[in-house]
Image: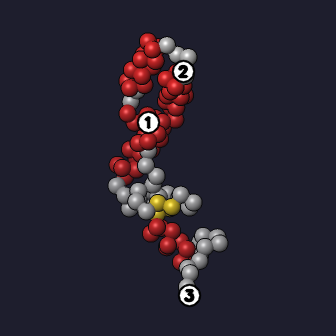
Amino acid sequence: MAKTSKIERDKQRRDMVARYAKKRAELKELIRDPKTDDEKRFEAVQKLAALPRNSSPVRVRNRCRLTGRSRAYYRKFGLSRIALRDLALRGELAGVRKSSW
């Protein structure tokens, strides 16, 4: 089980990313647009840099829904390898079973 502080920090980051998503998209569009003059582009870059670091989607970490573990995360299931294995062995994941050959 991951530390609850890490899990809560990640939740706060996700909230902040959602809160600033529209503003970040507008600024990035201004920066990318070739028709924007240099002064406006420079202002947009400064405004983007002034936003909180945790509002960047890159800083969000995928975590297991059950344990909060950040490593060995399977996107398809939203679980870590350990939780995935336990649920699969108990037969609680539909269509998944232990392979043997």
> Disc 2 or 1, which lies upstream in sequence?
2
Q: Amino acid at mark 3?
A: Trp
Q: Which residue is mark 2?
A: 34
Point out residue 39 in the picture as x, y percentages from the top left corner. 44, 12
The amino acid type, in three-letter code, at marker 2 is Pro
Q: Residue 28 at x, y = what percent? A: 50, 27
Q: Is residue 50 above or below residue 39?
A: below
Residue drawn at x 53%, y 78% is 89
For image coordinates 37% across by 33% down, the residue present is 53
Mark 1 burial class by Cα count in 10 Å: few <14, some 14-19, many 20+? some
Q: Residue furthest bottom?
A: 101
User: How far is disc 2 from disc 3 in space, using C-alphas?
Assistant: 58 Å
Secondary structure of the residue carrying tag 1 is: loop
The part of the image, by quadrant, that contains residue 67 is: bottom left
Foreground: disc 2 or disc 3: 2
Question: Taking 18 as reference, is 68 left or right?
Answer: left
Name the amino acid, label 1: Ser
The quadrant holding residue 60 is top left
Q: Residues within 10 Å of mark 2 (few under 14, many from 20)?
A: few
Judge left or right: residue 40 versus residue 9: right
**Image quadrant for the C terminus?**
bottom right
Q: Position of residue 7 (x, y in %)?
A: 40, 50
Q: Which mark is residue 56?
A: 1
Can residue 80 be seen in the rendering of this structure? yes
Residue 5 placement, left or right of 78:
left
Q: Nearer the viewer, residue 45 or 32?
A: 32
User: Mark 3 or mark 1, which has the lower sequence index?
Assistant: 1
Real-space Cα separation, disc 3 to disc 1, in angstroms: 45 Å
Which of these two is toward me, 4 or 68? 68
